[in-house]
Amino acid sequence: MSDDAHLEKLRARVREFMVELVEPAEDVLHAGGPEAVTAMAGLQQQARDAGLWAIGHPEHLGGGGLPFLDYVHVNEIQGRSEFGQIALGTFTLQDSLMLDRHATPEWRERYLEPIVRAEFWPSFAMTEPGIAGSDPTQLQTSAVVDGDEWVINGRKWFTTGAQNARYTTVMVRTETDAPIHESFSLIIVPTDDPGYRIVRDTPVLGMVSDHCEVAYEDVRVPLGNTLGPRGAGFRIAQERLGPGRIFHAMRWLGQAQRAFDLMCERLNSRRAHGSLLAEKQLMQQHVFDSWTEIQSARMMTLAAAEKMDAGDQARIEIGAVKVAGARMLHNVVDRALQVHGAEGLTDDTPLSRMYRAARFARVYDGPDEVHIQSVAGRILRRYAQGGGWDFGTD
């Protein structure tokens, strides 16, 4: 990690950018349309001018080259707003790292540095309607070889940003005789292919979400569009998801910080029944519970990040953080909303959208139940094999 003083200065700069520029623009950005496009382009240019653009991307791709652990800390600040990643040019990080490691020279040249510059969007497609997303071994979208091409058929959904993306990396079944976790490959599909059809933008809890349902109808792409070896789709997807869950958890902490701030400011300014809300014990309970949950989730997330940075897959820690972080966010936003009363149910504060997004967090990147089962199962197997779990060393 960089020295603490440097990191704190960087976090302060990012926070100033978020609070003074991004958060005030949220109403325009949520409304969509040409004004939103212009507003976001302006924010992105301001991020470039301030030296805050794509700071988590490797230097050789045109990014800031911030070390992993430093970026984890910064990700907490940019998570205050759902638009933070886009405004600061870090929303493509998982895709750029994946391409950097596994793409052919052709696709590196065509897509890699341009997505870091935000010239266009990438997208990633795994889950499918009618299939349990918690069990990707059931995925049905398939690709077969026809000459020197893949022919892809199937349907995906929750492909984030597909309507704006230049390409989608699609997880498809390609191997018929291999073990199940070696039966899938990742294939790059340009979104202008005539067989690539966006069915709808799938609303999430009543919000327009940019999570698209996409039909693949005899899509034909060259065999060279395979990302990594055939049959390596599961491995590469997991490689992509591990750091992604850490980034999610840190952004959730940024959202929780913002909700906590709003709650405490409200308690210190609103009077009811003869005194400030801050003087009422039930309201103080909300503050105490939120503080302890945020602090606990933060320590867990940073510990998992440190373990990953040391080369450990940290599967127990990441699974636990994914569940604990999502629960924490939901609880904190719920309390802040309760403190705001009827106003909290409206869009006069960001809490209404934050609440719905927090509920969604307990489902995407694997529902809580799958992570709970995985974490507990790994721990119990260690005991069954004569080992254990030492919280002081593990």
Image (cartoon, rainbow, N blue to C red):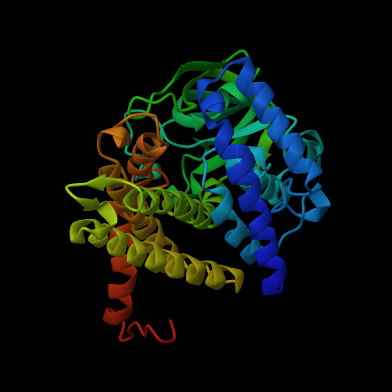
Foreground residue among 317 and 24:
24
Work out whether residue 318 can be spotted. Answer: yes
Q: Is residue 210 above or below residue 244?
A: above
Residue under the point 38% across and 68% down = 296
Quarter of the image holding residue 318?
bottom left
Q: Residue at x 61, y 35 (%)?
A: 187
Q: Is residue 382 depicted above or below 168 in this figure?
A: below
> What x and y, as percent, mark residue 214?
49, 22
Quick one: quadrant of the N terminus?
bottom right
The answer to whether any part of residue 228 appears in the image is: no
Task: Pinpoint residue 158: horizontal percent, then vertical percent.
Answer: 45, 31
In the rendering, at what x and y percent does residue 278 appear?
Answer: 28, 57
* Figure quadrant of residue 10: bottom right
Q: Quadrant of residue 59?
A: bottom right
Residue 356 placement, left or right of 120: left
Q: As drawn, is 173 to the left or to the right of 1?
A: left
The residue closer to the viewer here, 278 or 378, is 278
Assign the C terminus to one quadrant of the image.
bottom left
